[in-house]
Image (cartoon, rainbow, N blue to C red):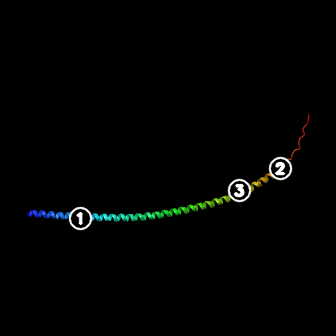
């Protein structure tokens, strides 16, 4: 019977050890699950903050792009207006030169025109 008592004591010790081991694993599992949930929540907060920062950066870039586009449009309008003024000036100058050339051509034609010959008489037969 002594052996039976020893075997029983060993079985009890093994049973208690197994119970302690299982409880420890449950606690660690619950602790790991809680840690995992905390990590997930932290990651979600971090992601939300990063997304918010990115959205602000995108809005800033949109505003800069719009302002830059508006400035480019204003610059182009000013350039077009200046070019139109230059074209008008060149057109006026060309018209003035054309009138001078025409008057010189007329004056030259009047000076170099051959005298008109008298009309020839036709003979009758």
| Residue 28 in which image quadrant | bottom left
Label 3 crowd bin: few (<14), some (14–19), many (20+), radius 10 Å: few
Q: Find disc 1 in the rendering and name its residue.
A: 23
Number of residue marks: 3
Q: Position of residue 2 (x, y in %)?
A: 8, 64
Q: Label 2 neighbourhood size at 10 Å, few (<14), some (14-19), many (20+)?
A: few
Q: Is residue 66 left or right of residue 30?
A: right
Q: Residue 32's mark?
A: none
Look at mark 3 in the image and give the residue it sits on.
91
- The residue at 43%/64% (across/down) is 50
Residue lying furthest left in this view? Answer: 1
The percent coordinates of residue 64 (x first, y second) are 53, 63
Choose between 1 and 99: the one closer to the eye.
Answer: 1
Q: Residue at x 69, y 58 (%)?
A: 88
Residue 96 occupies which quadrant of the picture? bottom right
Alpha-carbon neighbours of circle 1 within 10 Å: few (<14), some, or many (≥20)? few
The answer to whether the residue labelled 1 contacts the one labelled 2, judged by CB atoms less than 8 Å apart, is: no
What whole-number distance in Å separates the C-alpha atoms at marks 3 and 2? 31 Å
Residue hosting label 2: 112
Q: What residue sits 56% from the left and 61% below the top?
A: 69
How far apart marks 1 and 2 lie (CA) works out to 129 Å
Q: Earlier in the sequence, mark 3 or mark 1?
A: 1
In which image quadrant can residue 80 be found? bottom right
Q: Point out residue 24 in the picture as x, y percentages from the top left corner.
A: 24, 65
Q: Which label sits in the foreground, 3 or 2? A: 3
Q: Quadrant of the C terminus?
A: top right
């Amino acid at each position: 019977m002594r052996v039976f008592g020893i075997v029983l004591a060993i079985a009890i010790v093994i049973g208690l050890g197994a119970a302690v081991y299982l409880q420890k694993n449950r606690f660690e599992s619950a602790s790991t699950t809680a840690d995992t949930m905390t990590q997930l929540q932290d990651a979600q907060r971090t992601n939300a903050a990063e997304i918010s920062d990115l959205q602000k950066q995108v809005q800033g870039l949109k505003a800069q792009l719009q302002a830059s586009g508006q400035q480019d449009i204003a610059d182009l309008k000013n350039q077009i207006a200046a070019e139109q003024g230059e074209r008008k000036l060149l057109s006026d100058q060309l018209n003035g030169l054309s009138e001078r050339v025409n008057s010189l051509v007329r004056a030259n034609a009047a000076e170099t025109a051959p005298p008109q010959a008298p009309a020839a008489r036709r003979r009758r037969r």
